[in-house]
Image (cartoon, grey):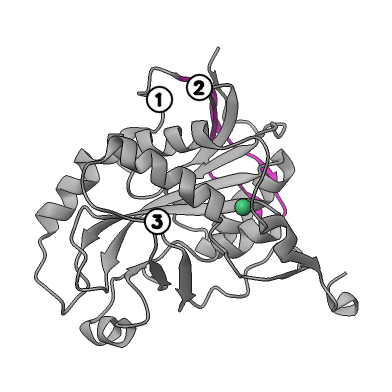
């Protein structure tokens, strides 16, 4: 039976999480997929950083997945706190694999709207760098985007998408909510391929809770000053491609092997600054 309870909930166990972004927002993900069983939705949890955004838990191929819409962002709550709430929750739920998705702009002149990019590195230009849960760990950001999970995403994207798919790319994170200026895009040239607002702090928080993390980026506009782009096209992508992105994310979860073959967990070390943080 599908639960629908506005009260605060006991935290369920889940191995997987999907942080929804602009790509799936228009589709009430993943309710329209036949092979998905919605276990409960509209769940709220008490966290040390405030009440969580509405969460949903579902099952695909026997795997339990926690998900929320639009990175947990909502008015009246900072983006930093939204991220802390959902990652605290993921840690309590025992989440070990996290996928996120979102629309991005281009920096690399070779990219076009509707290209898929699975980033392998990032450049954080946001001012949200101090976002952490408890600071217990030294986080080494080598291979911050899990190579194994990225491969799962790539295989799933190839199965369902016949457009261009790039298996690596550098994601520059800006603060938003506004887009970047032509001068900012010009500055990023040669340093990043795509630009967006949501890869950090999620990438640090995933490492802090010891989970693997990968991102599916979908190009929705050209970076300012590169080429002209239309809001109409961005709107069409927003509504037309949500189902495709949902399919790719679900297939990725089916593809994840039971035994980890990556070194993500080893890149989190106990902090040496114990007097400060512990
Ligand atoms: Zn990993």
Image quarter in which the N terminus is found? top right
Q: Which residue does the image show at 20% across and 69% down from the upper left?
A: 110
Helix, strand or loop for disc 2? strand
Left or right of 4? Residue 223 is left
Residue numbers of the magenta segment = 36-58
- The image shows residue 263 at horizontal and vertical percentages of 67, 57
Helix, strand or loop for disc 3? loop
Q: Do the residues under discs 1 and 2 have CB atoms within 8 angstroms?
A: yes
Few, some or many residues within 10 Å of mark 3 (<14, 14–19, 20+): many
Residue 68 magenta-drawn?
no
Q: Which residue is mark 1?
A: 31
Left or right of 255? Residue 206 is right
Q: Which residue is mark 2?
A: 38
Q: Which residue is mark 3?
A: 118
Left or right of 30? Residue 208 is right
Q: CA distance from mark 1 to mark 2?
A: 7 Å
**Rendering quarter of residue 171:** bottom left
- View extreme (top): residue: 1
Q: Which residue does the image show at 76% across and 64% down from the upper left?
A: 134
Left or right of 230? Residue 16 is right
Q: Who comes first in sequence, dot 1 or dot 2?
A: 1
């Amino acid at each position: 039976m599908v639960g629908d309870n506005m009260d605060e909930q006991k935290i369920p166990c889940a191995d997987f999480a999907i942080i929804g972004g602009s790509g799936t927002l228009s589709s009430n993900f993943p309710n329209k997929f036949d092979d998905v069983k919605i276990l409960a939705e509209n769940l709220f949890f008490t966290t040390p950083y405030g009440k969580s955004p509405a969460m949903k838990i579902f099952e695909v191929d026997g795997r339990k997945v926690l998900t929320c819409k639009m990175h947990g962002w909502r008015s009246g709550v900072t983006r930093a706190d939204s991220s802390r709430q959902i990652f605290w929750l993921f840690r309590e739920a025992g989440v070990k694999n996290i996928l996120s998705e979102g629309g991005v702009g281009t920096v690399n002149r070779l990219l076009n709207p509707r290209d898929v990019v699975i980033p392998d590195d990032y450049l954080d230009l946001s001012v949200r760098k101090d976002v952490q849960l408890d600071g217990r760990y030294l986080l080494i950001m080598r291979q911050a985007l899990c190579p194994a999970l990225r491969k799962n995403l790539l295989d799933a994207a190839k199965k369902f998408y016949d457009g261009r798919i790039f298996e690596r790319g550098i994601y520059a994170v800006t603060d938003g909510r506004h887009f970047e200026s032509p001068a900012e895009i010009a500055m990023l040239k040669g340093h990043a391929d795509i630009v967006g607002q949501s890869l950090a702090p999620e990438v640090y928080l995933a490492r802090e809770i010891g989970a693997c993390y990968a991102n599916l980026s979908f190009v929705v506009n050209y970076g300012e000053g590169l080429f002209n782009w239309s809001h109409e096209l961005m709107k069409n992508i927003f509504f037309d491609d949500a189902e495709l992105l949902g399919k790719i994310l679900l297939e990725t979860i089916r593809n994840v092997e039971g035994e980890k073959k990556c070194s993500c967990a080893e890149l989190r070390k106990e902090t040496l600054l114990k007097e400060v943080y512990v």
